[in-house]
Image: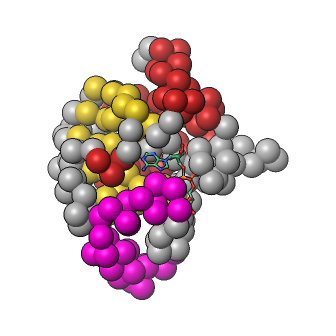
């Protein structure tokens, strides 16, 4: 599996699956979540509502998929990153977001997957650590996926891009 870094907007990526940094309600929010629902149109929220009615709130570290509405992708994989904590190590939950997203992408038959820096915005995860955890998780999970050939990290600003670039160079697999 190839790992790519792109500086840009995740809603503009021509990939099979786009990962959304959602919250447990699945009913939308700001950041990546807001952008995906805004650009993808109301069908994504409608599907999220149905999932929510059927299964309740989505626990941290877990994933569900919907179609991608008007986005240039086939699916949106919604995951809930952990809020960063200074008193408790929640790394395993952040790792789970990436591992479970790739597992679900594989199940859907997605070959290309775009990730944002999950938890690195509103949820307050320090950028360098968020990048390190993300890179290690996809490197590890990538060896177990059969269909996914490309994992693209889409970083919205320069500091995020630099942090992921550094993490990728440090973790040579
Ligand atoms: N494309 C790519 N990256 C983006 C985009 C975009 N269009 N917009 C923001 N980012 P965040 P979280 C970056 O806050 O920390 C929402 O309200 C952003 O700069 O979107 O997991 C949800 O509903 C940052 O580096 O996600 C939840 O309540 C990264 O994406 C909560 O925020 C993640 O920032 C989730 O917080």
Q: Is residue 51 visible?
A: no
Residue projecting furthest to the bottom: 53
- Counting from the top left corner in percent of width and height, residue 128 is at 62, 29
| Colour scheme of the picture | secondary structure
**Is 38 inside the magenta-drawn segment?**
yes
> What residue is drawn where x is 37% and y is 60%?
36
Position of the C terminus, as image quadrant, is top left
> What residue is drawn where x is 79% and y is 44%?
86
Magenta region: which residues?
Answer: 30-58
Quick one: 51 or 22, which is closer to the camera?
Answer: 22
Compared with residue 31, is residue 138 higher up or lower down, i.e. above or below? Answer: above
- Counting from the top left corner in percent of width and height, residue 46 is at 33, 79
Compared with residue 114, is residue 4 higher up or lower down, i.e. above or below? Answer: above
**Is 108 inside the magenta-drawn segment?**
no
Quarter-wise, where is residue 111 in the image?
top left
Compared with residue 87, is residue 52 higher up or lower down, i.e. above or below? Answer: below
Compared with residue 8, is residue 136 higher up or lower down, i.e. above or below? Answer: above
> What residue is drawn where x is 46% and y is 54%?
32
> What residue is drawn where x is 55% and y is 53%?
81
Left or right relative to 168: residue 73: left
Position of the N terminus, as image quadrant, is top left
- Counting from the top left corner in percent of width and height, residue 168 is at 46, 21
Left or right relative to 49: residue 136: right
Quick one: 30 or 50, which is closer to the camera?
Answer: 30
């Amino acid at each position: 599996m190839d790992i790519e870094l792109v500086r840009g907007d995740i809603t503009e990526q021509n990939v099979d699956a786009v990962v959304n940094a959602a919250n447990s309600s699945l009913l939308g929010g700001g950041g990546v979540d807001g952008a995906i629902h805004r650009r993808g149109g109301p069908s994504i929220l409608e599907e999220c509502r149905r999932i929510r009615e059927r299964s309740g709130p989505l626990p941290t570290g877990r994933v569900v998929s919907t179609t991608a509405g008007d986005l240039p992708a086939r699916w949106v994989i919604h995951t809930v990153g952990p809020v960063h904590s200074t008193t408790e190590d929640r790394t395993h939950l952040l790792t789970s977001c990436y591992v479970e997203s790739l597992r679900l992408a594989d199940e859907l038959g997605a070959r290309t997957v775009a990730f944002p820096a999950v938890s690195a915005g509103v949820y307050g995860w320090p950028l360098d650590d968020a990048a390190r955890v993300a890179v290690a998780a996809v490197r590890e999970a990538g060896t177990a996926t059969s269909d996914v050939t490309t994992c693209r990290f889409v970083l919205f600003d320069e500091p995020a891009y630099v942090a992921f670039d550094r993490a990728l160079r440090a973790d040579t697999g």
